[in-house]
Amino acid sequence: MNTDIVNELLDDDAFDPKKLFNQDEYSTLLIKREGFSKSQNSSADLLEGLLKQNITRSESEAIFSKLKEVNAGKLMIDAINSAQRIDEKVLITTACWESGIDFTNDFLFFTQLSCHENFNLSLEAFTVLENIEGTIDEQTLSKALTIAQSKKYALQTLNKELIKIIKDRGI
């Protein structure tokens, strides 16, 4: 073995983690898979596949379809919560509405997310809310309205639309 390579690896000053890991090129999303079934692992693989740099539209649509087929909604919510980068949160949130999964039970989660300061994330979460077809109980709608009305941020137009959607559902 070449001693120069070994010496370089052992030299603390020669080690530059920035060279080994570039966030712009690689996804940082790690889905905790402890206790996952084979099906859940497959769903996690699909979700991580959405974050690939050069994924085609047809590949994305196939993933959306499969995610809906296995009803991966909870996994998607967990992935949004664990994603460190906004662009990953945006992609996964987009997948939520593109997959056609019913997120009725997650109305408050997406209400909160639609109040995010990042426009793209806010818009995608808003789109999930627009696509929810299930009935939302009055108590949940009341909490959602409180969340939407208490947020003071730059996306006032989107916030007004959010409040309108909530009110149109029954408040």
Image (cartoon, grey):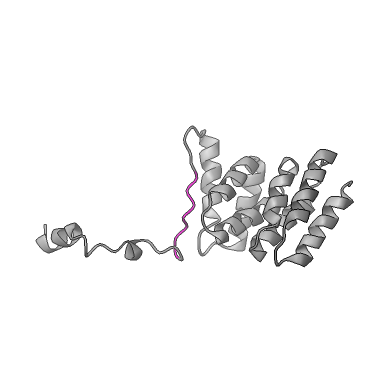
Report the side of 165 relative to 14 (left or right).
right
Quarter assignment of residue 26: bottom left
Residue 75, percent across and down?
Answer: 59, 42
Report the side of 39 relative to 8 (left or right).
right
Q: Main secondary structure of the magenta part?
A: loop
- Report the front residue among 86 and 52: 86
Per the rendered image, the range of residues in magenta is 25-31
28 in the magenta segment: yes
Report the side of 41 relative to 96 (left or right).
left
- Which image quarter is the N terminus in? bottom left
- Report the front residue among 160 and 105: 160
> Can residue 102 be seen in this snapshot?
no
Identify whether 108 is placed above or below 23. Answer: above
148 in the magenta segment: no
Q: Residue at 47% across / 57% down in the picture?
A: 27
> Can residue 48 be seen in this snapshot?
yes
Residue 160, percent across and down?
Answer: 81, 61
Identify whether 76 is placed above or below 127. Answer: above
Q: Residue at 66% across / 58% down in the picture?
A: 116
- Report the front residue among 146 and 79: 146
Quarter assignment of residue 23: bottom left
Residue 88, percent across and down?
Answer: 55, 57
Q: Residue at 78% across / 49% down in the picture?
A: 146
Q: Residue at 50% across / 63% down in the picture?
A: 53
Residue 7, percent across and down?
Answer: 13, 60
